[in-house]
Amino acid sequence: MYDTNYHKPSSVADAVSALSGAEDGKVLAGGQTLLPTMKQHLAAPSDLVDIRAIPGMVGVDDDGDALTIGAATTHAEVAADPTVNAKLPGLAKLAGGIGDPAVRHMGTIGGSVANNDPAADYPAAVLGLGATVITSKREIAADDFFEGMFTTALEDDEIITAIRFPLASKAAYAKFPNPASRYAMAGVFVAESGGSVRVAVTGAGADGVFRHEGMENALSGQFSESALDYTDVDAGDMLSDLHGDGAYRANLVKVMAKRAVAKAG
Ligand SMILES: Cc1cc2nc3c(=O)[nH]c(=O)nc-3n(C[C@H](O)[C@H](O)[C@H](O)COP(=O)(O)OP(=O)(O)OC[C@H]3O[C@@H](n4cnc5c(N)ncnc54)[C@H](O)[C@@H]3O)c2cc1C
């Protein structure tokens, strides 16, 4: 490991000031990605700014039309939260299917979304539900937030404080997990609200999470598994690696989309 300054601020303003004052500062949430990266000598931040003790960073707020989840809320907390289970059960189930219990008790929703791993589950829910990422500076619509593998609209000194998920009439997630890591080989989040459908795919895209317009159009006409029979998923747009080639992942995307529709319906 390296010499690193550790900060534990008690407000977002103090966290931002520690981050902007550092030579190469990083937000620390549950450390599930950041600490292994440091141990592997792939990152050597001069300062770690631990956001977990900041009031308001953990928990779920229900304003009737949307659920706002604090950025440092762990996956286990989201999975067990009664409001999330009652109002957006697809989101609670997604959180409960992340990694293993150790990962779910340390990993956070903000860390997952900021990291934007191409195989992570939460980005599919954020994009599929058309959520808003709330930061120390502004509010960013999901459609503008994800910019490709491990890349987001976040600036260096910008901290996600919460994510606001609008409620949907129907919403569900289905994933085919990698048996070793539990990350998605393909995961599809489907949401219907006011007659409009959003379909977000993770794990499979060569450039990270993305919306599938063909499936959205098909499901807007008829929200059923069979509506997806004649939609195409382009194998050329898929990731191809030792776990599965593009054609395999394209097929998985369609199968997971049908499963998500069946669960949501
Ligand atoms: C063995 C294993 C299995 C896993 N399986 C899955 C899986 O099946 N599905 C899945 O989706 N994920 C999986 N993960 C990822 C895990 O769930 C975490 O979500 C992810 O590692 C982020 O962790 P964290 O919240 O602890 O963030 P950290 O590791 O603390 O931070 C990650 C990155 O995000 C930045 N960051 C953190 N919080 C914020 C914030 N609020 N604002 C701005 N930047 C921030 C940090 O600076 C860092 O760059 C797995 C991880 C492990 C180790």
Image (spheres, grey):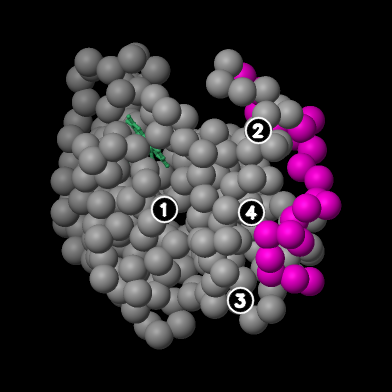
Q: Amino acid at mark 3?
A: Ser
Q: From the image, tell me which residue sits under label 2.
A: 249
Q: Which residue is mark 4?
A: 258
Contact flag, marks 4 and 3 (Cβ < 8 Å): no
- Residue 84 to residue 158: above or below: below
Amino acid type of the residue tagged 4 in the rendering: Lys
Assign a secondary structure to mark 4: helix
Name the residue at the front extreme: 226
* Amino acid at pointer 2: Arg
Assign the C terminus to one quadrant of the image. Answer: bottom right
Residue 97 at x, y percent in the picture: 37, 46
Report, in whole angstroms, how far the alpha carbon at label 3 lies from the one at label 1: 19 Å
Q: Quadrant of ligand 1?
A: top left
Q: Where's residue 142, x and y in %?
A: 57, 59
Are the residues tagged 3 and 1 within 8 Å (C-beta)? no
Give the CA separation, mark 3 to mark 2.
27 Å
Upstream in sequence: badge 4 or badge 3 = 3
Which residue is label 3 attached to?
A: 193
Please tell me in which quadrant of the rendered image residue 103 appears. Answer: top left
Q: Main secondary structure of the magenta part?
A: loop
C-alpha distance separating marks 1 and 4: 16 Å
- Find disc 1 in the rendering and name its residue: 94
Residue 67 versus residue 143: which sits nearer the camera? 67
Give the residue at x 51% y 39%.
Answer: 176
The circle drawn on residue 210 is none
Stretch in magenta: 221-241
Label located before the other in sequence (1 or 2): 1
Q: Is residue 21 visible?
A: no
Relative vertical location of residue 170 with respect to residue 126 in this rendering, above or below: below
